[in-house]
Image (tube, rainbow, N blue to C red):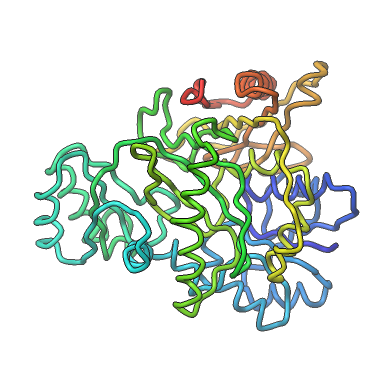
Amino acid sequence: MKILILGSGGREYSIGRAIKNEQEEHELFFEPGNGATENLGTNINIKDYNALATFAKENKIELTIVGPEAPLVDGVVDIFKKQGLTIFGPSAEAAQLEGSKVYMKNFLAKYNIPTAAYIESDSIEELYKFTDTLSTPIVVKADGLCGGKGVIIAMSHDEAKKAIGEMLSGKSFGDAGKKVIVEEFLDGFELSMFAICDGEDYILLQAAQDHKRIGNGDTGPNTGGMGAYAPTPLVDEELYQKVKDRVIRPTLDGMKKEGAPFAGVLFIGIMVVNGEPITLEFNVRFGDPECEILMPLMTSSVSEMFHKAATNRLKEINVEFSKQYAVGVVMASANYPYSSSLPAEIVEDTVHHEVIEKYTHISYAGVMKEDGVLYASGGRVLVCVGLGDTIQEARDRAYMRCGQVHFVGKKIRTDIAYQAL
């Protein structure tokens, strides 16, 4: 099958790697890809979605998979479908579940899906007034897309009000903060759950846990994610069933009623409070780095799953998972997440150890290639993934792989999966 993958990060690399490892022969294209995706397929550079759809048609692309949120919110799926192309991802209207946090919160309230108490407004007075009714900490969210960074956990009322003011003025997140949500802070443990949807049916993947903050012990500022592991032992069958019954099914039914059936990845950020799942947020694509650990745990065909979901035929397949665990450790550049860093050459030791060879791999993200040499060029540079029969074994192997990769200023957390261990 000829497959086009949109995006340039570790998420898109890991999807491409999983498809490349299948029994069938596939020809892969990436737009724009990164310095390492060209080892899996062909990188192309066509920014205009109409021109990209024309490219897909002329080159007989049989499936397009959209990685990041921005093209989805911008309507790439609608453009491709108008051309009669098969593409995996939600329409622009359905992508509002991530594109607008206000839309998402109001949707949750309308369809009685459990979520935190909140107010959404562009009135500073209203937001301040609601803030004063909450006990600290207080959650403040910008409405629009902020690259996973538009959420502030304020430890005092004054800090919350400062965040509200900076969002509404455009100082923090530009137009994305022109409407703001203030909501109660929920005390529990957080999970990432992913449902592959075709508008009607869905397949729930294994639950993962992400590590958002830059430092060990969840200290320092939020990032796009510094590591993840799956499946998490913090979820039992009862909790999975509650998420299916109380979150996923009413969401798919509700989106149909809204005239925007949801097909694609529904990423549910869950807070488990006293055994009950409360929805923190929806995203409409795979989390990153969760995608990097979920892909290698799938033992059935990844390309078939995406293709069936894109053609409303999920009913026809069974998705199967390995009995192993996966741990992914993000290796970031020197100044991440504060500012960009100078490109640094990546040196990888030759792997002589059979365990590292067999049970670990690297998913590349912020990398570029010049004269055959790979350089760290982005904030999150790569993810070292380890597989094992226990979380401890998978984690040890992931860190063994980290020890084989070197570049100036490399930064990692050394406690990934500590919640489970």
Residue closest to the eye, 369 or 156: 156
Would residue 395 be found to the left or right of residue 221 on screen? right
Residue at the extreme bottom: 82
What percent of the width, then of the height, locates residue 56?
76, 72
* Residue at position x 50%, y 34% in the image: 226
Would residue 243 be found to the left or right of residue 65 on screen? left
> Total of numbered circles in the picture?
0
Rendered view: 309 above or below 244: below
* Residue at position x 26%, y 47% in the image: 139
Rendered view: 10 above or below 102: above
Picture quarter containing residue 290? top right
Question: Which part of the image, by quadrant, shows the N terminus?
Answer: bottom right
What percent of the width, then of the height, locates residue 339?
43, 40
Residue closest to the eye, 195 or 5: 195
Would residue 259 be found to the left or right of residue 168 on screen? right
Would residue 152 be found to the left or right of residue 1 on screen? left
* Residue at position x 43%, y 23% in the image: 216
Residue closest to the eye, 101 or 39: 101
What percent of the width, then of the height, locates residue 279?
39, 51
What percent of the width, then of the height, locates residue 411?
52, 26
Residue at the extreme top: 353
Residue at the extreme front: 238
Residue closest to the eye, 292 or 113: 113
* Residue at position x 22%, y 49% in the image: 163
